[in-house]
Image (cartoon, helix red, strand yellow):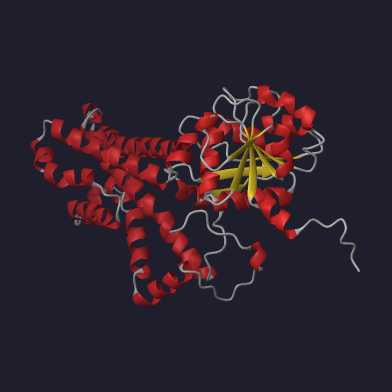
Amino acid sequence: MADVSNMVPLKDISAKCDRVCIFGTGDFGRSLGYRFLQAGYNVVYGSRGQSNYGLLPKGSEVLGHAEAAEKCDIIILAIHREQYGFLSSLSHILERKVLVDVSNNLKMNQYPESNAQYLAQLLPKAIVVKAFNTVSAWALQSGTLDASRQVFVCGDDAESKERVMDIARRLGLTPLDQGYLLAATELENYPLQLFPLWRLPFYIAVGLTAFIFFYSVLTDVIYRYVTEHVDISFRIAVSLANRVFPVVSLILLGSVYLPGVIAAYLQLHRKTKYRRFPSWLDRWMLCRKQLGLVALGFAFLHVFYTLIIPNRYYVQNKRNNFILSKSKLGFVTLMLCTGHVLLYGWNKFLYSSRYNWYLPPAYMLSLVIPCTVLVLKFFLMTPCIDRKLTKIRQGWEGNVKHKPSQRYKDSSLV
């Protein structure tokens, strides 16, 4: 028979699982405690003073650091690195406890090692997990987590890391496993990066603009100069630039919806939604909103240039082109914009004179991605495929070959 003398009562185990300790009563500690209480946790604050007890969320308990640590298995450290010193005196209490480091620094690579690694060196018998440092206190308290719902988690102990990820899910957040504790340096630098989600859309827009611009210069200006000895370089500043803006805008608008269509076909192929997308597709889907806003910006530039060009032909068409600026980032807009370009050059592709050096006009390049999206979307809208895709997104699975324990929800649902 098993020795029951050393067994912990089930009531105490469940109490510890539903109780979270927070060291630190600042803005982030208070906001995180408020969120924990909403999720049904019992919150215990470990504090050394009583100056701001009145600001703590109602329903929480306030104790000294040692007493609070003894009551909980998971301790959130909402304190700065400079305050880690007092934790050494609690090393015997923090042994085998899960310490969740949420700290950030004032500048990138401020210390030789990350705060989480420093904490692991300071308390080698504790289990350190890095998490919640990319979520703001204001978003936690106000509930506006749309822009910061993702929680990056890293740590060397897989079981402790999974416990922290379960807590994040219970708070309504989306945890993403970033590997071992070595990744903490990157996670601590992430909040200090300037508009991290805008970086990829910015690079795409700049690269695409440069390509279409030089392509137009080659097929219009340089071609005319080489074949006819006519210098029309004066058109580069305004009219040629105005040709680039709608092309880039339409390509970017198509790029907003292409990953969603690819994801839908991928789910149909896998017959399940409980598997993560490839990393390239996941990253593409995460920046769709930014791509749409950049596309809208190029559409406004197109409208602005159309209104200032001293050419009657362009001014007469300003009403048709203005539809690009009315982008609602929907398939209706994509259809209208694609239809506008098709009507603009519906018969021009038939004339060989339009293919300078056998290269198609720039406007034809803008139709590749939008037309691909619309054709693929058309098949997804057919009743038989739409019913199957709806069942998959509601949780139905067919011919699942992976084990239930290995299932992962897609980080971006379509």
Q: Position of residue 318 (x, y in %)?
A: 13, 41
- Residue ID at (58%, 40%): 132
- Residue ID at (42%, 43%): 144
In the image, residue 69 sits, relative to residue 412, either above or below, namely above
Q: Quadrant of the C terminus?
A: bottom left
| Nearer to the camera, 245 or 178 | 178
- Residue ID at (31%, 53%): 367
Residue 118 occupies quadrant: top right
In the image, residue 50 sits, relative to residue 336, either above or below, namely above
Residue 350 occupies quadrant: bottom left
User: In the rendered image, is residue 289 in sight?
Assistant: yes
In the image, residue 270 sits, relative to residue 233, either above or below, namely below
* Left or right relative to 342: residue 269: right
Q: Position of residue 152 (x, y in %)?
A: 59, 43
The tally of labels here is 0
Q: Position of residue 27 (x, y in %)?
A: 52, 31
| Nearer to the camera, 413 or 88 | 88
Q: Position of residue 169 (x, y in %)?
A: 56, 52
| Nearer to the camera, 100 or 253 | 100
- Residue ID at (34%, 69%): 381
Q: Quadrant of the N terminus?
A: bottom right
* Left or right relative to 63: residue 39: left
User: In the rendered image, is residue 162 in sight?
Assistant: no
